[in-house]
Amino acid sequence: MAFASALRRKKTAILMALLPLVCLSCAELKQSKPLLPMREYEKMIVGRLDADYVGTNNCVSKCHTHDKITSDFSHSLHGEQIRPETGLPLVNCESCHGPGSLAIEHLDDDREANTLLKKKCDTTKLLDIMNLPPQAQSLICLNCHSAASMPVLGHWNASSHAVNDVSCFDCHKLHQGPQQKVSREQMSEMCFSCHPQVQAENALFSHHPLREKKMSCVDCHEVHGSVQERLLKGNSPKETCTKCHMEKQGPFAFEHGDVTENCMNCHTPHGSVNNQLLNASMPFLCLQCHTGHLADNTPGLKPLFTNRCTDCHSQVHGTDTPSQAVTGMGTLRQ
């Protein structure tokens, strides 16, 4: 018993001595530590920790191979952010391609000689950005284009584009010219390459004027992410539509209940064989919710199944004028 008691006292003393060290280790773990600079991570991705950053001027001064790209970049929105007077380039070639010292180390200082001998930089020593996974490609852009600079990108990682392995490079071609985002004239064709069903719908008789270049996909869809279904802009489908169709916005004293929140209860947005982008022709569209009725109480009249409901009910989106025919019905033509 005495031996066991002495052993317990010894264990307790050891634990008491180690307790401050354990608490100190826990405190160390809870402390915030600065992350490595992004350039260190880029070196790791390249796989050569001995690579270093040399600056855009050193990269492009060795030969004429990238003269056009350099000129386009200098006239682009990205190139305008380089501040030579402060020595602080916010973005340059190495911001996307990683450290470039190994790529140009075999080149001579004589620019003309390198061009004559067709010697150019070794791109295998740079980030192989075109063969990175889509998520990694987007992270290169998100280094600068974070939610802080573009709040809408806070939705990017959960957006349907990101989830379906679409990266920034699929839509933005930075080396095609100074214009580094898709023009409105080219946008619908670019979107149709992944959305052929939408392209087919836009070829129908009734459609939004995408083919006529009077609007583009981004007028309705926030391609970088949205809290709405189908990447819609606005807080509701109706808010998206009434940016252009303001006369349908309301509020009205007499509202059509089905259209107060979602215009797509009656309309299909990309194209239809019916007038006004309707989901079905009238009166069959209305008869999905409303039963047919007689024109008046005159015996012998047939229900108005063959007439357009809007011949009488012209204000189908709502009105502030009460009907003279039926109390509380505000959609009849006055």
Image (cartoon, rainbow, N blue to C red):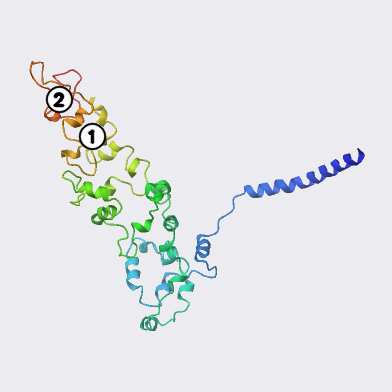
Q: Residues within 10 Å of mark 1 (few under 14, many from 20)?
A: some
Amino acid on which the number 2 mark rests in the picture: Leu
Examine the rendered structure and indicate whether residue 230 appears above or below residue 306.
below
Q: Residue furthest right?
A: 2
Residue 327 is left or right of residue 54, and the answer is left
Residue 30 is left or right of residue 284, and the answer is right
Residue 137 drawn at (x, y percent)? 42, 58
Q: Residue at x 43, y 52 (%)?
A: 146
**Mark pair 1, 2: CA separation:** 18 Å
Name the residue carrying label 1.
Answer: 266
Residue 46 is left or right of residue 17, and the answer is left
Pick whichever of labels 1 and 2 is earlier in the sequence. Answer: 1
* Secondary structure at numbered mark 2: loop
Examine the rendered structure and indicate whether residue 224 appears above or below residue 131.
above
Examine the rendered structure and indicate whether residue 324 appears above or below residue 125.
above
Where is residue 36, by image quadrant?
A: bottom right
Foreground mark, 1 or 2, reads 1
Number of marks in the rendered image: 2
Name the residue carrying label 2.
Answer: 332
Q: Mark number for residue 293?
A: none
The answer to whether any part of residue 97 appears in the image is yes
The answer to whether any part of residue 89 appears in the image is no
Residue 334 drawn at (x, y percent)? 11, 25
Foreground residue among 292 and 223: 292
Is the C-beta separation of discs 1 and 2 under 8 Å?
no
